[in-house]
Image (cartoon, helix red, strand yellow):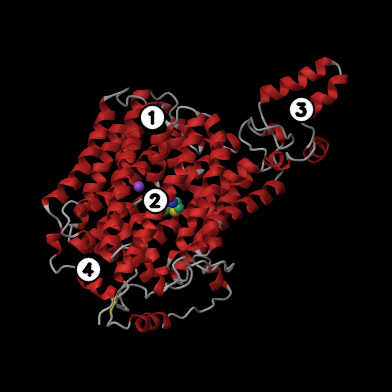
Amino acid sequence: MKSAGGRVAEQLLPSPNQQSLFTVVDFVIFGVLLAASLGIGLYHALSGGRQRTTQEFLMADRSMKCLPVSLSLIASFQSAVAIIGVPAEIYTHGTQYWFIGCAYILGLLIPAHVFIPILYRLRLSSAYQYLELRFSKPVRICGTLTFIFQMVIYMGVCVYTPAFALNAVTGFELWGTVLATGLVCTLYTTIGGLKAVIWTDVFQTLVMFAGQLAVIVVGVQKTGGVSEVCSEVSSVFSLFGFSLNPDPTERHTFWTLGVGGVFLMLSLYGVNQAQVQRYLSARTEKDAVRSCYMVFPSLQLALALSCVMGLVMFACYYLYVIVHAKQTRRCFPQMVISFVMDMLQGLPGLPGLFIACLFSAALSTISSAFNSLATVTMEDLIKPHFPAMTEARATLLSKALAMSYGLLCLAMAYLTHLMGDSVLQVALKIFGMVGGPILGLFCLGIFFPWANSTGALAGLGAGLAVAFWVGIGSIVTRSSGTKSLLPACGVVLLSDNTTTAIQTALGNVTLSRPSGLKRFYSLSYMWYSAFNCSTVILIGLIISFLTGPMKAEDVTPGTVYPLLGKLLCFLPERHKKKLCGVTPQVQTVRSRAAPRIVNILILKTCVILNRPTFLTCNRFK
Ligand SMILES: O=C(O)CCCC[C@@H]1SC[C@@H]2NC(=O)N[C@@H]21
Ligand code: NA
C-alpha cells in the first residue's frame, strides 16, 4: 500500500525529456524580463540628465524616494544563491536557518540609527571616504581594495549559480546563459547608471517574489494542501528545529544565526558600498532611514518564501531520497531546480516565470555590484589623483569601469565553476571573511574615538589574516560545522519503509568532536563576521593605545557616535559628568554664574565643532 507521499512522489519523478518543459510562453516570459531590464536602462540613459554627470550616474542625483531604495536594498543581496540555496538548506538541515530572521531586527536598526546618520551627513559618495575623514588615506585605500575583492568574488558566484543549476536540469547552454545574463546586465548598468540599477531592482524584486510564490502555491496544491505538507514534514524531523546549543562550532543554532547573523547584516546593510550608496542616493536622511525600516518586512517575506519552498520540496520529495555517496554537495542547486520543474511542468508560463525569478535575483545583485564597484574605483582610486578631471570625462570613465567590471564578472563565473561547497555557504563565507573585517574597521572608527590610523591598519590586517586562516582552514579540513541531517547530496529511491531508510541515512552520519586547531577551523561560518569584526576592533585598540590614542580635538567632527553618552544618558547629569566629562549643557547651566562671555564662548565652540565627542554626552542631534 503506497503512502500518500508515495503517490505524490510518483507524479513528481522528473519527466524523461526535460526539453518538453519549456513552451514558447516560457521563453517569452524570460525574454520579457531581459527586454524590460534593458528598457529601463535605456529610459534612464535618455531621460533626466541623460547620465552626463557622476552625481547622476553614480548617485542618482541623490533624488530617490524610500520605496524604490528599500526594494533595491533587498534585491542587492538576495541573489539566486538565496533563491536556490535556502530551499536546499531547509531540505537538508531543517528550519534552523529561518532564525537568521531574528538578526534582521538589530541588523537594520543599527544601520538606521548609527551608520546612516553619520555617513549621510558627511555627504559622501563612497563609504570609504569616511575612513579617510576618520583615519587617513591609506586606511581608505585598504578599505576600498578589500571591498572590491569581496564583491568581485561574490558577483562571480551570483552569475554562475543560476546558469549552472539551470544547465544541470534543463540543458540550457551553461556559458550561453552566463554570457546572456552578464552582457544584458552590463549593458543596462553602463548606460542607465544607479537610477536604472535601482528601478530594475524594483521590477526584479517583484518578479522574484512572484516566481517563488508560484512554486509554493502549486507545490502545496500538488501535495494535497498545507496540512498535508506540515504532517509529512513534521513526521520526519521537528518542523522548527530549535537549537540553543552555545557551541560555536555548531553550524546553525539560534546564537550563530540570531547573534552571528547581526554582524553579517551590519557588514552588508551598514557599511557595504552597494547599500550605503542607496542610502546616500535618497532625497533626505529621513528617506534613507525610512527605506532601511521598510527593508525589514520585505526581507522577512523573502526569507519566509525561500524557507517555505524548502519545506514544500521536502514534503514532496522525502520519499525519494537516493544516496549517491560520491556525488558532490553542489548537486543541491540541481535538486531545487528539478523540484521546481517537476512542480511547474504542464503549466505553461510558470517554468518561465521561475527562470525569470532566478535571473531577476542574479541580475539585481550583479548590477548593484557593477555600479558600486565603479563608484568606489572612481571616487577612491582615480578621482583623488586627477582632481582636474572634467565631469564629462569622469562620467565616461565611470561607464567604462562599470562595463569592465561586467566583463570581469564573467571571468569570475568561471572561477566559481572550479569551487566546491554549497553556493549559499560560499557566499556567506565570503561576507564573513571579508565583510567582517570591513565592519570592524568602521566600528573602530565610529565607536572608539581613541582609535588612530596605525591601529586601524593593523586591525584590518589582523582581521583579514585571521579571517583567511579560519576560512581556508575550514575548507581544507572541510570542517565548517556539523554534517547535514541528510546525506551529503542526493536521493535514495525507497520502498515504503521511509523511516528505516532515513534512520539508515542518519545513522551513518558521525559527528566527530573536533579538538585543538581543528576546533578553531570548525567555527561555524555564521560566526565569521562577528569573530573577524571583533579581531579588528581588539587589535585596532591595542595598537592605537600603544602608538598614542587619538585626542578628542583631533577627531574629525561628525565621524564619531557618542556611544558612551548614549548608553549612559539614563544617568543623572552629575554621574554622567563624572563618567564622561563635562557636558556643555551642564556647563551652560552651572556657568550661569560665570561671566556671560565664557558661556557664549563655550556654546560657540560646541556649535562650530558641531561634534558630539566621547567626552560630552550631549544628544546626537
Ligand atoms: O546572495 C545571496 O542571496 C546569498 C547571501 C545572502 C546574504 C544575506 S543572508 C541575510 C540577508 N538576507 C538576505 O536575503 N540576504 C542577506
Ligand atoms: Na538580487
Compared with residue 359, is residue 401 higher up or lower down, i.e. above or below?
above
| Mark drawn on residue 12 | 4
Instruction: Report the number of discs.
Output: 4
Earlier along the polypeptide chain: callout 4 or callout 1? 4
Earlier along the polypeptide chain: callout 2 or callout 4? 4
The image position of residue 610, as x and y in percent, is: 66, 26
Q: Look at discs 3 and 4 and give the one toward the viewer.
A: 4
Compared with residue 558, is residue 519 higher up or lower down, i.e. above or below?
below
Per the image, label 2 sits on a secondary structure element best described as: helix
Can you tell which quarter of the image residue 389 is in?
A: top left
| Mark drawn on residue 60 | 1
C-alpha separation, residue under disc 2 versus residue under disc 4: 26 Å
| Mark drawn on residue 302 | 2
The image position of residue 620, as x and y in percent, is: 65, 33
Compared with residue 106, is residue 580 higher up or lower down, i.e. above or below?
above
Earlier along the polypeptide chain: callout 1 or callout 3? 1
- Horizontal placement of 231 versus 262: left or right? left
